């Protein structure tokens, strides 16, 4: 078996570089872990300023006062690593994620698809470069050995037993996963590098050290089969961007939303899918995150069409607090259908209608636009509804007004009756107590109103005839 | 000799008073004196502003325009004075499946929605109730409707007294049984005032009243005989 291990030593910085401008990245930036009070990751400009890994915050500030500090967050690193694994999954089958910044990929079973190790290696490293991830790499006969070599910073590929053994022998023990007690015990007897350790007879070591150490050593020699769970991609699409600064204005979010939707577009195109529902989650520093969905009338995958719908939606959204991150989640997918071409112009009108309704609802809200439909009742208030209740018409439509007021208002202007009366007693089965005499009355200005006289002999206006 | 005025004559947007109208196809409204004053009827695209009280039959006047042409396209009603009723639309002759009702929070949103509907090529007619139309917004709607072959009817009950760059400007008043239409401004035509048309738009009791009147006169004749 040949495994390759990629040690991604600055995932937070790389994720930050994706969403900030190039000139911002030229400033010194460090990733600081407040648990250990030390600098974990730093970019080139920071190295030039004299900062080194392991420095405390005070030392860093003294060396470089205007350094940009990112907080180390294990979850965010894991997320970036998972996104990277999603990108690699179409290229390699056996991928496993190791802690929060390592990816191990098995190479020997892919040889029959790629032809040679060099081509395979080129493909993998190109994907890493496209993603903008910095890494140390190495290959070995097992995951632990490859990890050891990668942490050492070997950055060379050895595919034969001799090469791997030669590279391993030069590695220092401190990069291995042995605990500090074992390391200090070994150093007391003068064993500092892996080559020396591997030359020692195993049964002697077995008498002096615990089982875990022996297991690790046998794995290091490549004598056991790795028992790891392989990575499987999730069935929905997830994209997460930690914003480089807190965004207070929704207009500034557009750039990051575009990034998310571009990633989605690539995902959909590669799988020949379309979607009609996107869900965005905007998180604040404190409090509940804001979740909103954007749906389109027809399933689509292109960036421009989704971006126009999303920008219409976020125009109406105000952020309650500065936003710290934005995530896009998408799980409803449909296959692209090769529809038959249709020469009737009505077909284009139907699509244009659906797109129009989608745009109107995105900007004005879901309840703003509706198709009036016939209700199944003689009561005027129930004769129009937004869901299609019945296909047949209610018999009594002659007196139906053009516009019905939300609630009946008392009749105050002087009117003359032109039509009526129509007595309506309805709803007694629902205890509605509806007993009205309806008339059409005309005011002095010539306006015809739907008026009624209720049981208490008082007059009300309910509608207008247009 | 080509005069400098020839360029003006050739422009289709400029016409001379002695010319009769262009032969563009128009939607007849169904009332002969009005259609004659409008030189055939309403143009199939463009903005028509109607100043009138709500409820004197102003929508019923446009029955032919709203119901007959382009049945597969949408009719959109934006910001109606109250909830528009499906049975009335059905009886009027509009297909409910091709109707859309939109309610917006502000006038600006309503104008935006109208422009989107006109530009979408899916609408035959957009009917909008708006009292605050300016020359700039009217021009935008006019351009959107003429470019996309759609009609826009705008109803105002208290319009500002300004001239708008639109196809047709009408004003309606009702006197008893008749409606008086004033054509304040029209493309390719002159303004005409005081066109009176009879427009029954609701059911009324005239049949019963005439029957009762007939029976009382018969009763009187009967009584006089006896």
Image (tube, grey):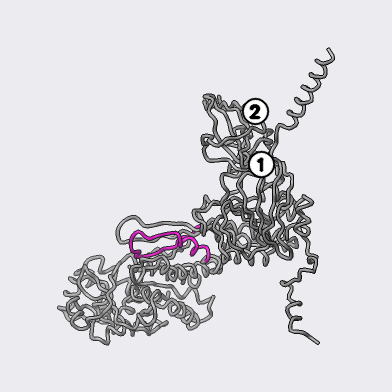
Q: Is residue A216 visible?
A: yes
Range drawn in magenta: A308-331
Say which residue label 1 marks: B88
Q: Is residue B85 visible?
A: no
Q: State left or right for residue A100 relative to residue B109.
A: left
Residue A317 located within the stretch drawn in magenta = yes
Q: In the figure, residue A321 lies in which quadrant?
A: bottom left
Q: Secondary structure at mark 1?
A: helix
Say which residue label 2 marks: A421
- Outermost residue toward the right? B225
Point out the image quarter for the C terminus of chain A: top right
Image spot of residue A250 (x, y percent): 41, 65
Q: In the figure, residue A23 lies in which quadrant?
A: bottom left
Q: State left or right for residue B39 relative to residue A330.
A: right
* Marks 2/1 same chain: no
Point out the image quarter for the N terminus of chain A: bottom left
A322, above or below A441, in the image: below
- Residue at image position (43%, 67%) is A251
- Outermost residue toward the front? B224
Image spot of residue A179 (x, y percent): 22, 70
Nearest to the observer: residue A198 or residue A350: A350
Nearest to the observer: residue A420 or residue A178: A420
Q: In the figure, residue A223 lies in which quadrant?
A: bottom left
Q: State left or right for residue B194 relative to residue B53.
A: right
């Amino acid at each position: 078996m040949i495994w390759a291990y990629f040690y991604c030593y600055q995932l937070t910085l790389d994720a930050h570089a994706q969403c900030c401008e190039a000139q911002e990245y030229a400033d010194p930036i460090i990733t600081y872990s407040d648990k250990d009070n030390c600098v974990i990751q730093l970019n080139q400009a920071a190295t030039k300023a004299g900062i080194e890994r392991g420095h405390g915050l005070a030392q860093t500030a003294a060396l470089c006062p205007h350094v940009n500090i990112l907080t180390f967050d294990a979850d965010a690193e894991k997320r970036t690593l998972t996104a990277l694994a999603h990108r690699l999954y179409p290229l390699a089958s056996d991928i496993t994620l190791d802690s929060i910044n390592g990816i191990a990929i098995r190479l020997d079973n892919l040889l029959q698809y790629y032809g040679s190790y060099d081509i395979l290696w080129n493909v993998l490293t190109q994907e890493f470069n496209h993603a903008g991830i910095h890494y140390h790499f190495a290959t070995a006969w097992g995951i632990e050995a490859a990890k050891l070599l990668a942490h050492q910073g070997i950055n060379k590929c050895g595919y034969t037993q001799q090469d791997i053994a030669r590279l391993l022998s030069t590695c220092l023990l401190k990069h291995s996963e042995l605990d500090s007690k074992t390391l200090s015990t070994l150093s007391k007897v003068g064993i500092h590098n892996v080559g020396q350790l591997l030359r020692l007879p195993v049964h002697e070591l077995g008498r002096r050290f615990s089982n875990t150490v022996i297991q690790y050593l046998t794995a290091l020699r490549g004598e056991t089969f790795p028992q790891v769970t392989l990575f499987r991609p999730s069935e929905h699409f997830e994209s997460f961007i930690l914003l480089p600064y807190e965004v207070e204005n929704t207009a500034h979010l557009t750039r990051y939303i575009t990034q998310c939707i571009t990633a989605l577009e690539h995902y959909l195109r590669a799988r020949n899918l379309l979607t009609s529902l996107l869900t965005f989650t905007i998180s604040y520093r404190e409090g509940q995150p804001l979740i909103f969905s954007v749906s389109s009338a027809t399933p689509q995958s292109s960036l421009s069409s989704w971006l126009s719908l999303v920008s219409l939606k976020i125009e109406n959204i105000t952020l309650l607090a500065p936003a710290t991150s934005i995530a896009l989640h998408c799980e409803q997918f449909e296959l692209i259908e090769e529809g038959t071409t249709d020469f009737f112009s009505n077909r284009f009108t139907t699509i244009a209608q659906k797109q129009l309704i989608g745009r109107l609802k995105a900007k004005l809200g879901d309840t703003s636009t509706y198709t009036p439909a016939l209700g199944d009742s003689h009561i005027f208030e129930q004769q129009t509804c937004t869901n299609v209740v019945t296909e047949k018409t209610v018999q009594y439509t002659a007196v139906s007004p053009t516009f019905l007021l939300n609630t009946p208002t008392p009749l105050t202007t002087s009117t003359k009756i032109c039509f009526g009366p129509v007595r309506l007693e309805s709803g007694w089965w629902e205890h509605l107590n509806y007993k009205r005499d309806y008339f059409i009355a005309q005011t002095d200005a010539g306006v015809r109103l739907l008026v009624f006289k209720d049981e208490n002999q008082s007059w009300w206006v309910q509608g207008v005839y247009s | 000799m080509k005069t400098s005025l020839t360029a003006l004559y050739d422009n289709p947007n400029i016409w001379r008073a002695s010319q009769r109208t262009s032969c563009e196809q128009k939607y007849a409204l169904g009332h002969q004196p009005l259609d004659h004053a409008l030189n055939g009827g309403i143009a199939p695209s463009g903005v028509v502003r109607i100043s009138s009280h709500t409820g004197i039959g102003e929508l019923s006047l446009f029955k032919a325009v709203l119901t007959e042409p382009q049945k597969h396209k949408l009719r959109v009603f934006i910001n109606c004075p109250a909830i528009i009723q499906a049975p009335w639309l059905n009886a009027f002759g509009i297909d409910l499946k091709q109707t859309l009702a939109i309610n917006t929070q502000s006038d600006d949103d309503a104008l935006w929605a109208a422009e989107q509907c006109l530009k979408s090529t899916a609408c035959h007619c957009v009917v909008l109730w708006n009292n605050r139309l300016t020359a700039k917004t009217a021009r935008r709607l006019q351009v959107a409707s003429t470019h996309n072959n759609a009609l826009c009817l705008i109803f105002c009950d208290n319009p500002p007294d300004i001239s708008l760059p639109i196809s047709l400007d009408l004003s309606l008043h009702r006197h008893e049984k008749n409606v008086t239409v004033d054509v304040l401004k029209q493309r390719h035509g002159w303004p005409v005032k005081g066109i009176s048309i009879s427009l029954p738009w609701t059911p009324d009791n005239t049949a019963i009243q005439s029957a009762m009147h007939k029976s009382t006169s018969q009763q009187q004749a009967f009584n006089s005989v006896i």
